Image: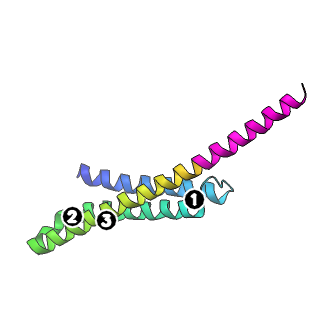
Amino acid sequence: MALKIGFAAGAVLVIALLAFDVRAWRCGDRRISRRHKGLRIASAAVIVVILGMMFFGDRIHRYGTTVAFSYWMACMGLVCLLLLLVLMDFREVARVWGQAQKDLNKLLAAKDMDDHKDE
């Protein structure tokens, strides 16, 4: 029973974090791109589906071994999909971070050039 409460709490937490992320994006926080937002939404949806499958997974053995095996293989496939989405999300974060670093370096270099002109 405690495990099921944990799964439900995990699903609620994922949805709450996603809502916070989407709300920030809608309020004008454009640190994440449209693609990045899509990856986050897809990842959250897959996590909720996986948690739901784990929540109801103890009942699936009643339908036979083949059905149970297929069910858990589908769950494993979703986990692999989630890992792929997370890697894509990580690449997007690294790309945005790299661009922010380049912009900051350009800004600092321009400021340094302006400081030397005054001397």
Between residues 35 and 114, which one lies in front from this camera angle?
A: 114
Residue type at the position of mark 2:
Gly
Q: Residue furthest right?
A: 118
Q: Which label belongs to residue 22?
A: 1
Secondary structure mostly seen in magenta is helix
Give the Cα distance between marks 2 and 1. Answer: 30 Å
- Magenta stretch: give its range: 98-118
Pick the quarter of the image with the C terminus. top right
Q: CA distance from mark 3 to mark 1?
A: 23 Å
The stretch drawn in magenta includes residue 108:
yes
Labels 3, 2: front one: 3
Q: Give the total number of marks visible in the rendering.
A: 3
Q: Position of residue 60 (x, y in %)?
A: 17, 69
Q: Residue at x 15, y 70 (%)?
A: 68
Amino acid type shown at disc 1: Val
Is residue 102 located in the magenta-colored stretch of the structure? yes
- Residue 30, position in %: x, y? 65, 55
The residue identified by callout 3 is 78
Q: Mark 3, residues whose alpha carbon is within 10 Å: few (<14), some, or many (≥20)?
A: some
Front position among marks 2 and 1? 1
Horizontal and vertical percent position of residue 83: 35, 57
The answer to which of marks 3 and 2 sits earlier in the sequence is 2
Residue hosting label 2: 57
